[in-house]
Image (tube, grey):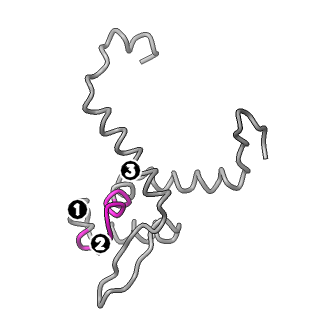
Amino acid sequence: MGENIDGFTDPSDGVLTEAAAVFGLLASPARLHLVWVLSQGESDVTRLADRVGGALPAVSQHLAKLKLAGLVRSRREGRRQIYYVDDPDIVTVVRVTVGQLTARTHQAPAPVSRLRGVGV
């Protein structure tokens, strides 16, 4: 454990490694989109592929990776696998991040003159 500053203690190397792995999985736009859709409710792979605009085999592979990492779970319903996110913290992180970025895209862009001063 690291230093305690302002009531926050640095996480362990193991926690940081695990968090980086989760963020690494979510760094894929396709996987992030799947988690976004699943944060709104459960779905089968066919509906997910239609919703995210991906090929069925590719969506299945992404779901397998997310499932292996424990970010997504599934249950059998007849002949279909129904996928869902069972971790409210992941749902919160994805919803807040995507929601904030979406809100920013609706704001007026910064004038070019302001961007020059920030190294852009």
Q: Are marks 1 and 2 in contact (CB under 8 Å)?
A: yes
Q: Looking at the image, is 117 positioned above or below residue 99?
A: above
Query: Which residue sits at x=43%, y=72%?
Result: 64
Q: Amino acid at mark 3?
A: Arg
**Residue nearest the observer in this picture, 31 or 73:** 73
Question: Dot 3: what SS?
Answer: helix
Can residue 65 be seen in this snapshot?
A: no
**Residue 98 point in image, percent of width and height:** 36, 45
Q: CA distance from mark 1 to mark 2?
A: 10 Å
Is residue 37 part of the magenta span, yes or no? yes
> Residue 25 got which mark?
none
Instruction: Relative to 62, say whether 22 is above or below.
Output: above
On the question of residue 52 being in view, the answer is: yes
| Structural distance between the alpha carbons of marks 3 and 1 | 17 Å
Q: Which residue is mark 2?
A: 43
- Dot 1 corresponds to which residue? 51
- Frontmost residue, 89 versus 53: 89
Mark 1: amino acid: Arg
Q: Across the whole image, how many numbered discs are drawn on residues?
A: 3
Which residue occupies 38% across, 70% down? 84
Furthest residue toward front: 7
Residue 74, position as x, y percentages in the image:
41, 77
